[in-house]
Image (cartoon, rainbow, N blue to C red):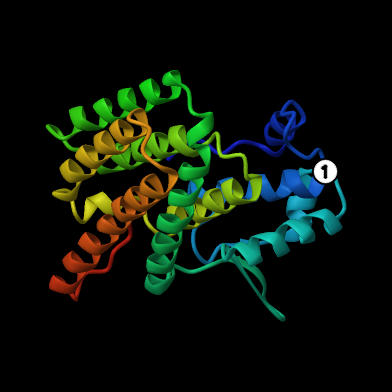
Amino acid sequence: MKTAKSADETTAEIATSPAASLSKAESAYRWIRERIADQTYEPGHKLVLAQIAVEFDTSVVPVREAIRRLEADGLVTFERNVGARVAMVDQSSYVQSMEAVAILEGAATAQALEFLSDEDLDEAEAINERMRALLTNFDPTEFTRLNHEFHAALFRRCPNERLHSLVTVEWDRLAHLRNSTFSFVPDRAGGSVDEHARIVALIRARASAEEIERVVRSHRSATLRRYQEAQSKSPAATPTATA
């Protein structure tokens, strides 16, 4: 697990990012979201607004705004007389987020096509080769981390900021729900790497946006299907692990 950033470190990063808001609410939102993603705040963890406000040297108002955004993202629940808590793991939520990622990532990658450079594609291929090297001595957590890097390299040029943000939200939700789908379906990893190579080859060959969107969506959906097949054969299993 990576070390969580302090409130001051998070605020400093946002202040130096030209694309980011400088508001306290945005800073708190990103900081809490990161702690949920890296499981510093585990499912069920109570989020004390006053305590977070003290860490950010601000009033409770921007923290409450951040919590409301996280609730809309599905990462936090709020109950009367109980308060805000990190959302509990839900199998149906995992499936829905995987389906959403397949759709959103396919669309984001398709929109990024005309902005991708040869350097971007070289980077994606290099990441995929690192993933291929892991197949010999498989590390599902590292494989999943590189898997995210690969896909990010292909859709980060997406000009639709809202679409890009939606992909990030679903990634964060998946990180909250599972550490690594490949822990349950390690035999899927080799096929995933081969499909990555095909996606990059299609982009280099200037395939249409429609075809790229379809192939990326199918690639993501295949991992979910394989996971569901594995779970159906082991009904007693309790997964704790993102594709």
Q: Amino acid at mark 1?
A: Ser
**Up-down relation of residue 69 to residue 14 (above or below):** below
Q: What residue sits 37% from the left and 71% below the top?
A: 91
Look at the image and tell me whether residue 139 can be seen: no
Q: What residue sits 71% from the left and 29% below the top?
A: 17
Look at the image and tell me whether residue 26 can be seen: yes
Query: In the figure, residue 193 lies in which quadrant?
Result: top left
Q: What residue sits 81% from the left and 45% below the top?
A: 24
Is 220 or 107 nearer to us in this picture?
107
Q: What residue sits 82% from the left and 43% below the top?
A: 23
Image x and y of residue 231, in percent = 20, 69
Image x and y of residue 153, in percent = 45, 32
Image x and y of residue 179, in percent = 36, 51
Q: With 29 as the anchor, is 181 left or right in this view?
A: left
Image quadrant for the N terminus? top left
- Within-10-Å neighbours for mark 1: few <14, some 14–19, many 20+: few
Q: With 46 as the anchor, is 37 left or right in this view?
A: left
Q: Residue furthest bottom?
A: 80
Is 195 or 178 nearer to us in this picture?
195
**Which element is circle 1 on?**
loop
Image x and y of residue 131, in percent = 25, 32
Query: In the figure, residue 7 lies in which quadrant?
Result: top right
Q: How many marks?
A: 1
Residue at mark 1: 23
Is 40 or 95 nearer to us in this picture?
95
**Up-down relation of residue 24 to residue 238 (above or below):** above
**Up-down relation of residue 223 to residue 88 (above or below):** above
Is 202 or 95 nearer to us in this picture?
202
